[in-house]
Image: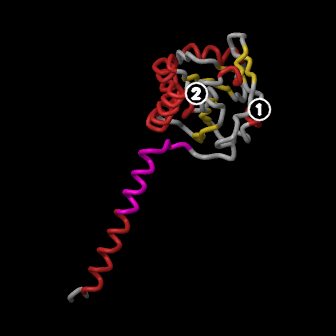
Amino acid sequence: MQIPTWFWSFLAGVLVVIAGAGLISANQSASAPSWAQSDLASKDAPDFALETLRGDTFRLSEHRGEVVVLNFWATWCPPCREEIPMFVDLQRELGSDGLQFVGVALERNAGPEKVQAFAEKMNINYPIGMGDGRIAKKYGGVRGLPMTYIIGPDGTVEGHIPGRATESMLRPGLEELLEEATSDG
């Protein structure tokens, strides 16, 4: 049985369309961070004050000019535990460039002592505090953990990452925001 010529032309056209869509998608992902857009995107990030486990207060408004990564997490959450070492590394590497992580622990049963022991075990080098739901509510509610918000140096929400963040999701966009912050300042 011989395949009609029109079939080969049709198949070639389909392949061209698929290849073109792949190129467009690759170009978009190379130039844009892989952060989800939320209702808060490009709006001023809701200000908050978080009492940290070290006894001081982290106020978002005091970090204008910096890129802030706000992470909602819990000690019982496996993806949270997986992403924390990468957060620690990025904070160590890019903190002097204006990057600031802050963690809000949304615990079911663990108290501050257990969270502090966990933080020490994980070598967490950024402020963390216990959340009571008020900060999460300001960010539209946290329906799953982890949930990470990226706040630009101008104080606007740049995007968020629902679920486990990876370095390839975070680093390119963070470096771009840090570069913009230093060129603007």
Going from N to C along the chain, the mark reached first, 2 or 1, is 2
Please name the residue shown 37% across and 57% down the image: 23
Q: Nearer the viewer, mark 2 or mark 1?
A: 2
Disc 2 and disc 1: Cα gap in Å? Answer: 23 Å
Q: Position of residue 110 (x, y in %)?
A: 70, 22
State the residue in front, 48 or 182. Answer: 182
Among the 4 quarters of the image, the one containing residue 113? top right
Q: Is 177 part of what is drawn in magenta?
A: no
What's the mark number on residue 133?
A: 1
Query: Dot 2: within a 10 Å radius of its alpha carbon, few (fewer than 14), some, or many (20 or more) residues?
Result: many
What's the mark number on residue 110?
A: none
Amino acid at the residue labelled 1: Gly
Q: Residue furthest front?
A: 184
Among the 4 quarters of the image, the one containing residue 109? top right
**First to last magenta residue range:** 20-35
Q: Position of residue 158 (x, y in %)?
A: 60, 39
- Label 2 secondary element: strand
Among the 4 quarters of the image, the one containing residue 159? top right
Which residue bears the numbered disc 2? 67
Judge whether 151 appears above or below 58 on screen: below
Judge whether 174 appears above or below 102 on screen: below
Q: Residue furthest top?
A: 55
State the residue in front, 185 or 16. Answer: 185
